[in-house]
Amino acid sequence: MNVHLMFRQKDFLPDIKALLQSSVLISDFQLRRLEEQLQKETADPAQKLCQSYQELAADLGLFRLLEQMANGDKIILTACSAALFAPLQNKEDISFRLDCLRDALHNRSTIRQLYQTTIDTEKQRAGSMYWLGSSYIDSTYASGINLLKLYTEMLMKLRRTADAASGQFSSEGFQHLFAQLKSELSDQYFAQVKSVLQSLTDQSGTMISASFGSYLQGVDYVLRKKEDSHFWRHWQFSPAFTIADRDDEAAKDLGCRKGRAVNNAANAMAQAAENLQDFFAKLRLELSFYAGCINLADRLDQIHAPFCIPELYPTSSEERNCRSLYDISLALNQNTSVIGNDLSSDHKILFLITGANQGGKSTFLRSIGQAQLMAQCGMPVAAEQFACPIREKIFTHFKREEDTAMKSGKLDEELARMDAIADSLVPGSMILFNESFAATNEREGSEICRQITQALIDHHVDVFFVTHLYAYAHAYCDLPCTESLRAERLDDGRRTFHIIPGRPTQTAYGEDLYHKIFKK
């Protein structure tokens, strides 16, 4: 092993840091204004809702929706779940995300290509033997170089995609992303990075320098940059010594000295590689949300079910408009389009839904809750047109089966759940009741519903209530803040599964079911 003593070459570290600066800047890319739970895969998505997301998903039938959006991808499932169960409350943030959604739906192949690049990057990194946390400097040094080569190649793919598709995107989020990719990752930058990485992996040797310490020991070891031209001719007559082939101790000592020289460069490259890894992880998580929305849109297109970009009104608004709103989970389960419903109301915060058994009331209620959540998290909504006000929190109170362990009665369980919800309610919230408090007689059940409903509307909480309690529904149907809806039933007893304006009636037409089952 030949060693030349170099003392006047340029320090390599400033060049490395300068060329890797973009890896620090790139970690600040933000495709959209995300809540913290989307940047942490372990975040609790139920924290902002203050209701168990398992309970909310079960009541509204959201598991099938998320399964379809994920299409087997755990990253998409994580991102879409976190977004769905923690809806935004700021109109500007929702509009920002919806603008990105429009771009994503109009450029589905580009979004999938970008997302796949981030997936491929992680697969190659995870499948490699690169280890930045090694206790051996040489290992960290080599891993940093190889990882930067990998990330540079993937950044070039992102840049090429941005060059090809940037003119097709109009949203602030994607335009900012593509503009940053173009400005930070120029052709000159890639050429310089390639040159630096090639120099760092030069098989002809590593140039270092050192100074003498107080006791003539080596100090201040520095990695040096080789001259671009006439390098070897300039140094071929410099002082040198040769280590014998079997002198292991000398080789070990030289390796330690080399490690001291490349330590700062290894740390700089390791930090740059970690920053780029963080960038690709964030970009992957952010793009996964839109990839999930695209998966959903593709599936709805296949079954000829409509969807739309929702419109959000301020929290102070009490206006709702929808056309052909349907239960998206029902459509996905049946693999076909289903009957939708229209709703147009203003200055209404209590919606009483009554009518015939098995007429579509619960299905309509689920579609309202689904659409509210999907609209506020920036997803497409299962309707031809949908507009609603932003709501601070969203809760469900659906009937449950009897407690088989006999720890409490059905009514006690419903009251306990209502008590837990009441602790988390704030003005501007929304709560959906499905045949709640019907486990007792008509008079008591109606009185419980009346007191709870009055407290809720007094505190400006939107209430959607499916009920068979006529006394309760009749007491509230004529209030100015009430919208009375009824499941349509034809004269011959057939259900159309349409929810139409209509006052409550004293019968749920249970005899229709009797005739259908026992008198065929």
Image (tube, helix red, strand yellow):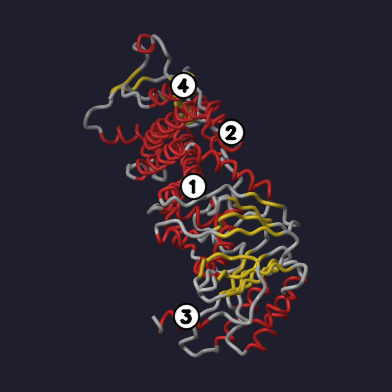
For the residue marked with disc 2, what is the amino acid?
Answer: Ser
For the residue marked with disc 4, what is the amino acid?
Answer: Gln
Q: CA distance from mark 3 to mark 4?
A: 77 Å
* Foreground label between 1 and 4: 1
Which of the 4 quarters of the picture holds residue 516?
bottom left
Residue 217 in view in this figure: no
Q: Which residue is mark 1?
A: 285
Horizontal side, residue 409 vs residue 243: left or right: right
* Foreground label between 2 and 3: 3
Q: CA distance from mark 1 to mark 2?
A: 21 Å
SS for tag 4? helix
Point out the residue furthest to the front here: 491
* Foreground label between 3 and 4: 3
User: What residue do we see at 27% from left, 26% from top?
Assistant: 243
**Percent of width and height locating residue 442:** 64, 88
**Percent of width and height locating residue 295:** 44, 48
Closer to us: 250 or 464: 464
For the residue marked with disc 1, what is the amino acid?
Answer: Leu
For label 1, count other residues whose C-alpha is less than 10 Å away and answer few (under 14), some (14-19) or many (20+): many
Q: Which residue is mark 2?
A: 170
In which quadrant is the C terminus drawn?
bottom left
Q: Which residue is mark 3?
A: 513
Q: CA distance from mark 3 to mark 1?
A: 49 Å
Residue 374 in view in this figure: yes
Which of the 4 quarters of the picture holds residue 427?
bottom right
Who comes first in sequence, dot 1 or dot 4?
4
Who comes first in sequence, dot 3 or dot 4?
4
Q: Which residue is mark 4?
A: 192
For the residue marked with disc 3, what is the amino acid?
Answer: Leu
Who comes first in sequence, dot 3 or dot 1?
1
Which of the 4 quarters of the picture holds residue 255?
top left
* Foreground label between 2 and 4: 2
